[in-house]
Amino acid sequence: MSDYTRMTTTSADQLRYSGFWPRLAALLLDMLIMLPLTALVFWGSERHRLFQLYCLVPSTLFGLFYGVYLVRRFGGTPGKLIVGVRVRKVSGEPVGYREAILRYLPEFILNLLMSVALLMSLLHMSDAEYHALSFMERARRMVELAPSWYKPLQIVQNVWVWGELIVLLTNRKRRALHDFIAGTVVVRTSPNQSLQPTAAAPTS
């Protein structure tokens, strides 16, 4: 094994697996970091009926950048790096794009489908009806106008979220469902590693 590989890889028996609370803290930090963007979408949606349609592509690209590129480049989202945890392969090696994409894929598909369903609701509403409703009334109306597959999709999403939690809490390495799909683990790192880029070991 080369010196480069030794510097970027931790053997599986040396990994310190991250538990539930650090991962929850990382999630909350990521939500806090993205709060300005969430506020922008809320502000725009209050003023323009089709604002969410216009920002669908930019928000999708940002999600891929945040959930895939940053995980591949730095080993985690900003929230994970701040907390001091990183995503690794089960072997301890840094993740590549394959692992980063597979980890994010279920969340990406579910969120995209739900966004599309609610955008279809907006297309069935007039500007007058949209702006006459309060935020909560509008949300209920959008669910009413959503396609028939929206409610089953909500059930699937709830099953996924609870499944993630149950699986995370019931295995020794604290792997969630998306970790099993991608072949990854979330591990604790030393402070001086938290903000350093990761690089996959070169193949011989």
Image (tube, rainbow, N blue to C red):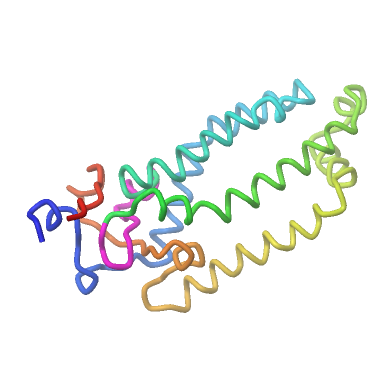
In front here: 167 or 204?
204
Q: Does residue 21 appear left or right of residue 141 in this picture?
A: left
Residue that appears at 40% across and 41% down: 69
Q: Quadrant of the N terminus?
A: bottom left
Which stretch did the figure color magenta? 78-93
Residue that appears at 92% across and 28% down: 129
The image quadrant of residue 88 is: bottom left
Residue that appears at 88% across and 41% down: 141
In front here: 105 or 136?
105
Q: Quadrant of the C terminus?
A: bottom left
Q: Where in the figure is residue 165, as x and y percent of width and height?
A: 54, 68
In front here: 76 or 112?
112
Q: Where in the figure is residue 51, as x and y percent of width and height?
A: 72, 25
Q: Does residue 202 appear left or right of residue 77 in this picture?
A: left
Q: Where in the figure is residue 149, as x and y percent of width and height?
A: 82, 54
Identify whether 188 is placed above or below 143. below
Residue 146 is inside the magenta segment: no
Identify whether 46 is placed above or below 114. above
The image quadrant of residue 52 is: top right
